[in-house]
Image: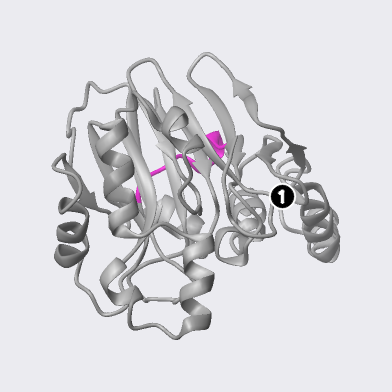
Amino acid sequence: MVTNNDNNNDITKVILLGTGTPKALPDRYGPSTVILVNNTPYVFDFGSGVVRRMREANIDLESLTTVFLTHLHTDHTIGYADLIFTTWVLRRKTQLNVYGPLGLADMTENILSAYKEDIRARIEGLEPANNTGYNVKAFEVEPGLVYQDSNIQVEAFPVKHGLLKAYGYRIQTPDKIIVISGDTAPSEELINHYSGCDILIHEVYSAESFLGLPQVWQKYHKEMHTSTYELGEIASKVKPKLLVLHHQLFWGRSEEELVEEIKTKYDGDIVSGKDLDTF
């Protein structure tokens, strides 16, 4: 489904592979976004169903080499093994380079260790598996420029998400500036990182439904995530060309109601993202 910029001449395309949360809604897979630049894929986060969504989006899995992670919560990482091994089984030959926060190296090492018998059987057994595609190199990054090639420049910036070290990413391509918030509570520091972007992909929860939550969950979400009203205020300052809602917590509200809550603070273009939406 294409919701914006349906132009075959675009150098850059953004596809929401998954827009879900830990709620495990059947029509929303785990959080993941792919940015295609000159048909080269760059994946940000790898929630559940990431590889199957990539196949649905007609992504060339063999060309996947570069992946980024916002933080280590399970809903953003549960598809890591899938991303490594399913793409290898489907003939990806190149080493996977993964960039993310502290803890990524340990996670990577332990996933490879957990699947060592599978790796051995595929390489030494009858299956004609290549002996390179399962290799992964993890880069634990600090804020600032973390990756650059002829297609893309990626900057990490710290966000507020509880005890975990967490990042958002500002991505510059030849024709777009895209910001992926990751999971974050609002802060003044975000304004500089978001400013001047073409597409802002941002997590959000319903401020109205929040009022009906138990106090313990109100405290959690207030400290960890961004409400519709808060996001509206942020967007009114940075004025993205397009605001895309992602990782939405509806709590009984509709997509239209979620957008309307934001529009009480912001009058720009807003899309409530769904899996496989393309921009």
Snapshot quadrant of residue 147? top right
Residue 67: x, y in percent?
59, 40
Residue 79: x, y in percent?
59, 61
Residue 59: x, y in percent?
42, 42
> Which residue is labeled 1 in the image?
129
Q: Is residue 1 visible to the viewer in this orientation of the structure?
A: no
Q: Which residue corresponds to the image point at 38% horizontal and 48% vertical from the top-left?
A: 202
Above or below for 214 versus 195? below
Of 182 and 222, which appears nearest the observer?
222
Looking at the rendering, the stretch of residues picked out in magenta corresponds to 57-64
Snapshot quadrant of residue 62? top right
Of 275 and 251, which appears nearest the observer?
251
Outermost residue toward the bottom? Answer: 214
Residue 59 counted in the magenta span: yes
Kind of residue indicated by mark 1: Ala
Quadrant that contains the C terminus: top left
Residue 34: x, y in percent?
44, 42
Of 143 and 265, which appears nearest the observer?
265
Q: Secondary structure at mark 1?
A: loop
Question: What colouring does the structure picture have?
Answer: one colour
Above or below for 135 versus 49? above
Q: Is residue 172 visible to the viewer in this orientation of the structure?
A: yes
Q: Which residue corresponds to the image point at 61% horizontal and 64% vertical from the top-left?
A: 78
Above or below for 173 versus 157? above
Left or right: 254 in relation to 151: left
Please give the count of numbered marks on the rendered protein.
1
Residue 223 counted in the magenta span: no
Q: Which residue corresponds to the image point at 48% horizontal and 68% vertical from the top-left?
A: 221
Q: Main secondary structure of the magenta part?
A: loop
Left or right: 258 in relation to 165: left
